[in-house]
Amino acid sequence: MKIRELFNSDFTFFTGNYRILVLSWIVMDLAMEMPNPNFQYYVQALGGTGMGVGLIGFANFISMAAVSFPGGYLADKYGRRWIITTMTFGMALSHLILALAPSWEFILFGSIVNSLCLIYQPALFAMFQDSLPPEQRGIGSTITQLINSTFNTPGPLIAGVLLLQFGLVPSMRIIYLLMTSLFLIAAMIRLRLQESKEQYTPIRIQSILSSYPQAVRESIQIWKKVPRSMFWLFIGQTFWMFGFALTQVINALYARDILFIPESQWWLVYFPLLITMGIASIPVGRAIDSVGRKKPLYFALIIWSCATLLFINGTFFTVMIAMSLFGLAQLLAMAASTALSADLVGSEHRGRVNGSINFAGYIAMACGMLLGNYLYVNISPPAPFYTMLALIIPIFFIIRTLIQEPVNRQ
């Protein structure tokens, strides 16, 4: 088979809404990774010492949780397109607050506004799942990871160059201004999306707030209508997100204060993570479509455990290896769980299911960030990492004994 024919057979889904979403993600990804290497340092530079980073992370994810239920409900009732396009513009403008912040409290406020705009996430996930045929969900999910890692890769480099050229605070302000511009471009691209929900009610703005109680009820009741395996996948994902947040809130501080990796070099460790995710994306996607969804989840847990142990007592070199392993584990877990969720849940329920998953996951991440920061400051710097390792055991048990892959995929 010719290479072109092989490409066409593997990527027949690369049309319509999927293509538009990918194009918008490419534009957003160009800037998405820029603030991450130095964000914790930026918060401290503007006065957010002690528990400041943890409080911002907590408020950030609590805000995302608050809009998860209505996000899923609105996506299933009023359609996906309107909320995706509107809130992408809102996200773009929220980065101005972060760019102009005179103190860490404004970063807190800007993060909350940004998170509230993510009410569109359940609709985005539902439209993404609607756009993929069942037999290509693994490759379709990892293609987005390939694009994400490929176009994220320049982000740490740009952050490092700006840091060395302008210093910490000015470089972060420039980064957030770039994010504002690129997100506005992505929002305009998303105006070309077509509604993927076959039956929906025309949106009435006044109904958004009044629908909140109904959204919560339906998002809870939806679990009576989906397979039991989906519920346990939801529980496993929630544990994973909690553990992930424990360490992500303090990893840069740990690297600087405990491993003695200078601030000016920390951005370099992001390259192995992003490059690994890019190289592994297509092979991982094909593996998920061929060997099933559960085996990649096992491997993700094993790899994540090894990466955490490497990081705890790492040198600059071993931290780079650990970050590469984190990227591979993250790719396996996200792609396999996304594909399995789409296999288990029909299109008519995906908005509310994703809304429920987001709600619980964001609450878990909010608590994880607050607890991780607390453990780091008040107990022991390695404590968040060991707590994360302990959580691997119940997650593995849930996947092994309580989740079954469906014979007939939705």
Image (cartoon, rainbow, N blue to C red):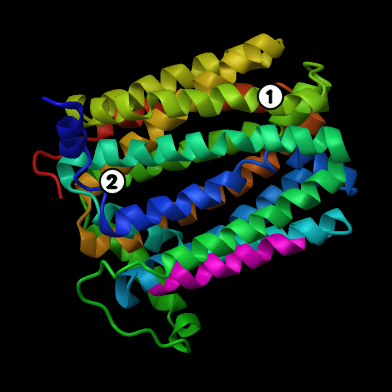
Chain part drawn in magenta: 82-97
Of labels 2 and 1, the one closer to you = 1
Looking at the rendered structure, which numbered label has been put on residue 268? 1
Q: Nearer the viewer, residue 313 or 270?
A: 270
Is residue 302 among what the camera can see? yes
The residue sitting at 29% across, 70% down in the picture is 195
On screen, residue 226 above or below 249: below
Give the percent coordinates (x, y) of residue 392: 46, 25
Q: Earlier in the sequence, mark 2 or mark 1?
A: 1
| Residue 310: quadrant of the picture | top right
Q: Residues within 10 Å of mark 1 (few under 14, many from 20)?
A: some
Q: Amino acid at mark 1?
A: Leu
Give the percent coordinates (x, y) of residue 197: 25, 69
Give the percent coordinates (x, y) of residue 357: 41, 52
Q: Amino acid at mark 2?
A: Ser
On screen, residue 113 above or below 227: below
User: Which residue is tagged 2?
Assistant: 341
Q: Quadrant of the N terminus?
A: top left
Residue 84 included in the magenta stretch of the image: yes
Disc 1 on helix, strand or loop?
helix
The residue sitting at 35% across, 66% down in the picture is 193
Q: Nearer the viewer, residue 108 or 1?
A: 1
Q: Nearer the viewer, residue 10 or 145?
A: 10
